[in-house]
Amino acid sequence: MQIMHTLVGERSLALEMPLPDEWIMPGIRWGRFEELFTAAYWHGQAWQAQMHNHYGSLKLGRTLAEEVAACLLGGYGMKAEIGLAAYRTVRDLGMLRSGVEPTRLELILSEPIMVRDRLVRYRFPRQKAQYLAGCMDALDQIDEASLSDTQLREALVGLPGIGPKTASWIVRNYRHSDSVAVLDVHIIRAGQFLGLFSKRETPQRDYRSLEARFLHFAEAIKAPASLLDALMWQHMRLLQYA
């Protein structure tokens, strides 16, 4: 048995884990909790995050339309800080509604944005303006309240500029859902280090298969999938393992 400790306020808490050589699931051993990116490492980090109430809220927007905009304007090829700044700009100007002309959004996204005390330019303003306008129009046709988390994800897939990853990101954030996974480059790399994913597999081709394995792993280490997803993303990004 290996034991990990953490402090919560003035309390010392302990987490017992199986020995490093024991199997947690086919092909994956527990490993040592102090060794980066092992199953025991993620189990321990997720436990600590829960004890300290980290990742309690993942929402970026107050409504589904706002969450769609925040995730659509972020994502692949875009630094998180710039995507969020662009989202807040269009939100504060009242542009997140149906009937907004793409050219109006393009003008807004083409203007320099203040991020951490410096002006930066948003990439792909024309393309993202087209996508965003199309999504705002299409959302009126989605009966959100009648859909489960996975049904809402599938309803969002195929909207302009939205594939499985972005749709999962929206649902994960907006509903704090443990039924989907946001398989971006950081999560894929973490899964490869674990032996959960192979380098031959890609989210573009194998999204739902990869997602099923991620959710199985989260269940095996007794971590909410939404928390584990966010935790992995932050750790891999900060440690520059993607």
Image (cartoon, rainbow, N blue to C red):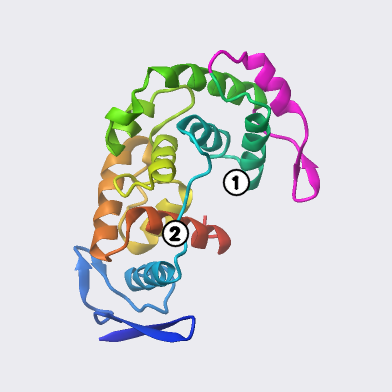
Q: Residues within 10 Å of mark 1 (few under 14, many from 20)?
A: some
Residue beneath the point at 30% across and 85% down? 2
Where's residue 56, x and y in %? Answer: 44, 57
Q: Is residue 104 magenta?
A: yes
Q: Out of 90 and 107, give the one closest to the viewer.
A: 90
The amino acid sitting under disc 2 is Met
- Mark 2 lies on a secondary structure that is helix
Q: Which residues are magenta?
A: 98-124
- Mark 1 lies on a secondary structure that is helix
Q: Does 52 sit above or below residue 90?
A: below
The residue indicated by pointer 1 is: 80
Q: Is residue 45 magenta?
A: no
Residue beneath the point at 51% across and 38% down? 62
Left or right: residue 124 compared with residue 112: left
Where's residue 9, x and y in %? Answer: 49, 81
Q: Out of 25 and 43, give the one closest to the viewer.
A: 43
The residue indicated by pointer 2 is: 232
The amino acid sitting under disc 1 is Ala
Where's residue 172, x and y in %? Answer: 39, 44
Q: Does 182 sit above or below residue 53?
A: above
